[in-house]
Every structure is written in structure tokens, then in C-alpha cells.
Amino acid sequence: MPTDDPPETLHVTTDEQLRAVSNLTRHRIMAVLRFEPATITQIAERVGLAKGSSSYHVRLLERAGLVKVVRTRKVRGVTERYYAMAARAILLPDPGEGGPDVLMRHAVADLEASPVDDERHVRMAHLRLTEEQFAQLGARLQALADEYQQLSDPALPDVSLVFALFRPAPREQADGDSK
């Protein structure tokens, strides 16, 4: 395990970092490294990639400062590197008006790739809320996510929690975009 604790949050600020996290394969590699360090071979096995592809994607993440080598060891004359996330959380910039939300795109891709016979809890609700209710609900959802993140145990199977609380585009704008 890493000898020093990583920083709590890493803010994605450069184009190189944004390109690195925008790729679904690299997103999945970071998910593998979320709880414990892993070698290129371990990452390749868990993500279902060839070692060469895994190495390529990890190098891009490392160059962008999103993952780092946390320990090495010699195995039959070869240096084996263990990679881990550079921070406990990666904070992405706001995608801006009309921009794709990388987190939601990856979450939908992960949901679609998850086994259909596993238990899932997926729900969409359209609400009408005051500003205060909107803020309270956002804070409650964040607190709930934070609470369960503290309970996470690396020995247990991976579970993803994704939520989005937002105001949809005005009806006229949404209708105009589809024409």
C-alpha cells in the first residue's frame, strides 16, 4: 500500500488531464485503482485489455498526473510497478453549456455494460422544487454518497452510485435543438 496518503482531491485543469479522463477505458482503469494499487498485468486482467493497451492507457494517465507509481518490486529481473490514483477524488470542470458531461457518459456506459441479471436501482424522477428544496436535496444526496463512500471496503465488490440533480433546459430550447 502507499506509504503516504494521497491528497483528498485533484482538480482536472489541463487539456491533457481532460482528454485522459474523457476516455472510457481510462475511466475504467481509474476505477480499478480507486481502492488499491495494481500492476499493468492486474489492470489488464480486471479491465479486459491486452497488457500493451493497458500500459499505454496507464502511461497517459500517469503523464496527466492522475495516477502514480506507489511502489516497485523486482520479479525475475523485471521491475514491476504498482499504480494508484494520485488523489482520493478527481474533480472535473463544469462541462459548460451544451458540453458533454464526461461523468454521466461514463456512468451510462458502465450501467449498460453491467450484468442485466444483477440487482440494479435505477430511477428518474421529474420534480418541481423551490430553490431551497433543490439545495437541500443536493446536499442530502451528497451527504448520503459521502457517508457510503466512508463505509467502502476494498475487499467488497465494486458498486457505482451516480446521481444528477439539475434543471433541464427550457422547453423551447430543448425543442429547438432537436430540429
Image (cartoon, rainbow, N blue to C red):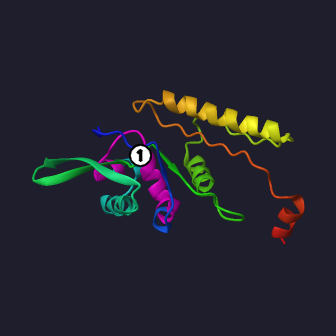
Q: Residue at x 39, y 45 (%)?
A: 33
Amino acid type at mark 1: Val
**Residue drawn at x 63%, y 37% as measured from the top left:** 142
The answer to whether any part of residue 178 appears in the image is no
Q: What residue span does the magenta drawing correspond to?
A: 18-44
> Does 165 sit above or below residue 77?
above
Residue farthest along the right direction in this orientation = 172
- From the viewer's perspective, tell me whether residue 116 is left or right of residue 97: left
Q: Which residue is mark 1?
A: 32
> Percent position (x, y) of residue 70?
28, 46
* Relative side of 155 to 146, left or right: left
Majority secondary structure of magenta residues: helix
Q: Quadrant of residue 97?
A: bottom right
Q: Position of residue 43 (x, y in %)?
A: 35, 50
Vertical side of 154 occupied by 110: above or below: below
Residue, x 46% and y 58% (percent of image)? 25
Regarding mark 1 in the picture, which secondary structure is present there?
helix
Work out whether residue 166 or residue 47 is closer to the camera in this orientation and state it.
Answer: 166
